[in-house]
Image (tube, helix red, strand yellow):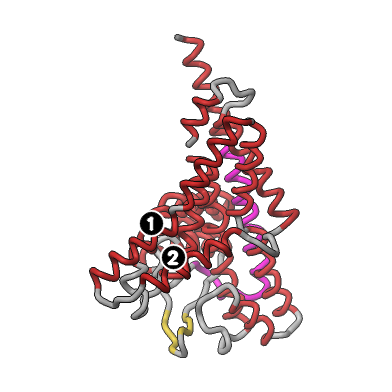
């Protein structure tokens, strides 16, 4: 997509490598100012489209047949992306500024950072007010585990885990793919991530049907999740080595191949331990160690949010510096030739 647009606009005032982080910053500002659209959010429409497909194609529990149906449903669900690409190319041919606006708006719709902060804030405020019941309810909106039997510290720990892990999916991974291929690839990841959230369960209904969607989501997040963990470690300053040590020794034991590096690194950077157990469908399960130091509590939720903010600032700074370096190298080659 970016290569095609470079062909359409051979002369652009600012190189694409520098332009993209600027567009990303505008999208983040829109997210901060507007939050998620209250009505007509495209991801809601996509979720309904995916649910319609799943209802009609997920008819078999047999392994190979169900995997085939799940793959077909995945391809059909993502097919509208071709229309998005066509629309963006048409806009690019009509007006550079219209295309830039569309890129910003689409990335804004992919980012869920403001919404994630709101949900974590609601949990934190309820805990600080001593309202454990409300904190459990608010936490239940953003985690898959049962929340009704969690105590204050366990609610806080689950909230911090959700903040760290979901900051990758709803923020950093989208920014990574936007840097690689603009809003088209950011939207591709967001849709695949949505399909994984809907179909990626190890249950009788979805064990095989959602397998391809889950594996594709893991693949798309593999590199950016590790970059997220690295930036979090760097953003922790003097605690960088401690964070990296937690990542190196603990991430492999986590159930999520991409969430593990982010959560263990974030917990190590904060000097806290996250949940040692979790309840799923009424059954308590032990969780592998994540982090070091004392068990996290409600007082650690604000520092966790601050860590993600610092990581975001460092991410954008490194992205901009990398773009400037690529721009300098490009013009250096031009002058030499």
Which element type, helix, strand or loop, lies under badge 2? Answer: helix
- The quadrant of the rendering that contains the C terminus is top left
Instruction: Find out whether residue 336 is within the magenta segment.
Output: no
Q: CA distance from mark 2 to mark 1?
A: 13 Å
As drawn, 20 above or below 275 = above
User: Which quadrant of the figure has residue 58?
Assistant: bottom left
As drawn, 231 above or below 285 = above
Front residue of 10 and 114: 10
As drawn, 337 above or below 245 = above
Q: Residue at x 55, y 41 (%)?
A: 87
User: What label does residue 196 carry, if any?
Assistant: 2
Front residue of 212 and 19: 212
Position of 313 with respect to 51 (left or right) is right
Looking at the rendered image, the disc whose residue lies closer to the viewer, 2 or 1, is 1
**Residue 306: image location, x then y, percent:** 66, 58
Query: In the image, which residues are magenta?
Result: 291-320
Q: Residue at x 49, y 34 (%)?
A: 2
- Give the crowd class for mark 1: few <14, some 14-19, many >=20 residues within 10 Å: few
In the displayed image of the protein, which residue is found farthest to the front? 56
Front residue of 320 and 247: 320
User: What label does residue 152 carry, if any?
Assistant: none
**Residue 62: image location, x then y, percent:** 25, 76
**Residue 79: image location, x then y, percent:** 43, 53
Position of 196 with respect to 322 (left or right) is left
User: What label does residue 75 carry, if any?
Assistant: 1
Instruction: Find out whether residue 295 is within the magenta segment.
Output: yes
Q: Earlier in the sequence, mark 2 or mark 1?
A: 1
């Amino acid at each position: 997509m970016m290569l095609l647009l470079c062909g359409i606009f051979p002369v652009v005032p600012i190189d694409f490598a520098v332009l993209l982080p600027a567009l990303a910053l505008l999208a983040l500002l829109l997210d901060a100012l507007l939050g998620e659209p209250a009505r007509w959010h495209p991801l809601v429409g996509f979720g309904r489209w995916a649910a319609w497909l799943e209802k009609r194609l997920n008819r078999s529990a047999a392994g190979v047949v169900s995997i085939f149906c799940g793959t077909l449903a995945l391809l059909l669900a993502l097919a509208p992306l071709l229309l998005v690409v066509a629309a963006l190319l048409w806009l690019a041919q009509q007006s550079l500024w219209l295309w830039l606006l569309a890129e910003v708006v689409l990335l804004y719709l992919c980012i869920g950072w403001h919404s994630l902060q709101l949900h974590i804030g609601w949990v934190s405020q309820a805990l600080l007010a001593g309202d454990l019941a409300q904190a459990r309810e608010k936490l239940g909106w953003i985690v898959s585990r049962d929340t009704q039997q969690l105590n204050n510290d366990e609610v806080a720990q689950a909230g911090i885990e959700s903040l760290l892990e979901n900051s990758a999916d709803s923020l950093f991974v989208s920014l990574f793919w936007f840097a690689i291929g603009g809003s088209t690839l950011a939207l591709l990841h967001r849709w695949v991530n949505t399909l994984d959230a809907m179909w990626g369960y190890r249950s009788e209904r979805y064990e095989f049907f959602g397998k391809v969607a889950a594996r594709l989501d893991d693949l798309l997040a593999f590199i950016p999740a590790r970059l997220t963990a690295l930036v979090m470690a760097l953003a922790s300053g003097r605690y960088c080595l401690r964070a990296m040590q937690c990542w190196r020794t603990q991430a492999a034991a986590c159930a999520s191949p991409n969430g593990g590096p982010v959560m263990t690194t974030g917990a190590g950077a904060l000097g806290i331990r996250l949940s040692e157990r979790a309840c799923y469908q009424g059954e308590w399960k032990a969780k592998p160690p994540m982090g070091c130091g004392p068990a996290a509590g409600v007082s650690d939720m604000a520092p966790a949010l601050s860590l993600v903010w610092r990581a975001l600032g460092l991410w954008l700074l490194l992205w901009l510096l990398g773009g400037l370096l690529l721009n300098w190298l490009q013009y250096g080659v031009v002058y030499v030739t």
